[in-house]
Image (cartoon, helix red, strand yellow):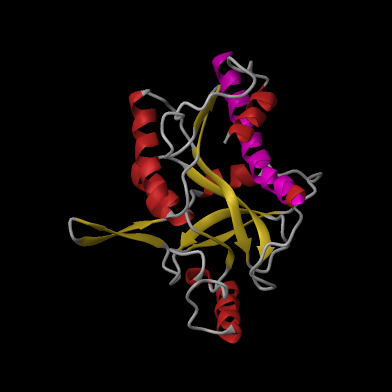
Amino acid sequence: MERFTSFVIQELGLQPGTGDTPTNYAAGTDRYALYKAGPVLAVSHGIGIPSLSVVFNEILKLVHYAKCTDVTFFRIGTCGGVGLEPGTVVLTEKAVDGAFQPFLSTTILGKKVQRPAYVEKPLLEELLSCSEITDDFKTVTGTTMCTDDFYEGQARLDGAFCDYDEDDKMKFLNNVKAKGVCNIEMESLGFLAMCNHAGVPGAVACVTLLDRLKGDFVSTDFSLLKSWQHRAQKLVLRFIKRRITQQNRHKNG
């Protein structure tokens, strides 16, 4: 979050705050990190939907009490690709769970509640248009699978529990690809379902660190991984800069 906030400050031409590094406004807790740079609020959400849902609720209340308007939420992160070259940026069209259901199934007052998880088409198209022909990476759109678990839920063979073999894994992953899934991670379903339920525009941009059809392990050099992770951030920041320019033009008549 700190590095991303520094990137935002640089790209938006903002004056950094007191000190050499951005301020973590949640420094008093170890639950998450929270930074602000101009109109951009950056927060870490932990791993998986349960962790994300807590942070999402608190940030949603924060922007409400702060009377923020024209808010757009983004999840920026990493994922495993399915048939994609590592380093590809995937913009989620819709999210599905590990059983290919396109909604978040949650339990409220002892009853199952389903909330759809998709990105509004105009927002998706606007974000995709921020990719540039000169980019040294591909940007694609597609379905994202959001699992409950990093190991068995994603058909990995190296977890503490594994009651299937390589053939079972590959059958599953090939079926995942056949159903149009481009990438696998652990937060998009909850994030988009909550955005839709709150009526807040939201999108997901993740960079693939490996192709799951070719392996389970990330073996890429750390410095290259770091540059790949910057790709999704770069795309979202282009979107932010474009929106700021549009708002300034509107204000200036």
In front: 130, or 225? 225
Farthest residue toward the front?
Answer: 160
Residue drawn at x 41%, y 45% as measured from the top left: 195
Q: Which quarter shows the C terminus?
A: top right
Q: Which quarter shows the N terminus?
A: top right
Residue drawn at x 57%, y 69% as measured from the top left: 180
In the displayed structure image, the side of residue 14 where residue 74 appears, left or right: left
The magenta region covers: 224-253
Q: Quadrant of residue 247?
A: top right
In the displayed structure image, the side of residue 114 where residue 161 appears, left or right: right
Residue 236 picture location, percent across and down? 62, 39
User: How many numbered badges does the structure rendering display?
Assistant: 0
Residue 100 picture location, percent across and down? 45, 70
Q: Quadrant of residue 215?
A: bottom right
In front: 133, or 237? 237
Q: Is residue 199 visible?
A: no
Main secondary-structure element of the magenta-colored stretch: helix
Residue 119 versus residue 31 in the image, above or below: below
In the displayed structure image, the side of residue 198 where residue 141 appears, left or right: right
**Residue 229 in magenta stretch:** yes
In front: 232, or 167? 167
Q: Is residue 100 visible?
A: yes
In front: 129, or 74? 74
Residue 244 picture location, percent across and down? 59, 25
Farthest residue toward the left?
Answer: 109
Residue drawn at x 70%, y 55% as measured from the top left: 88
Residue 16 picture location, percent across and down? 62, 18
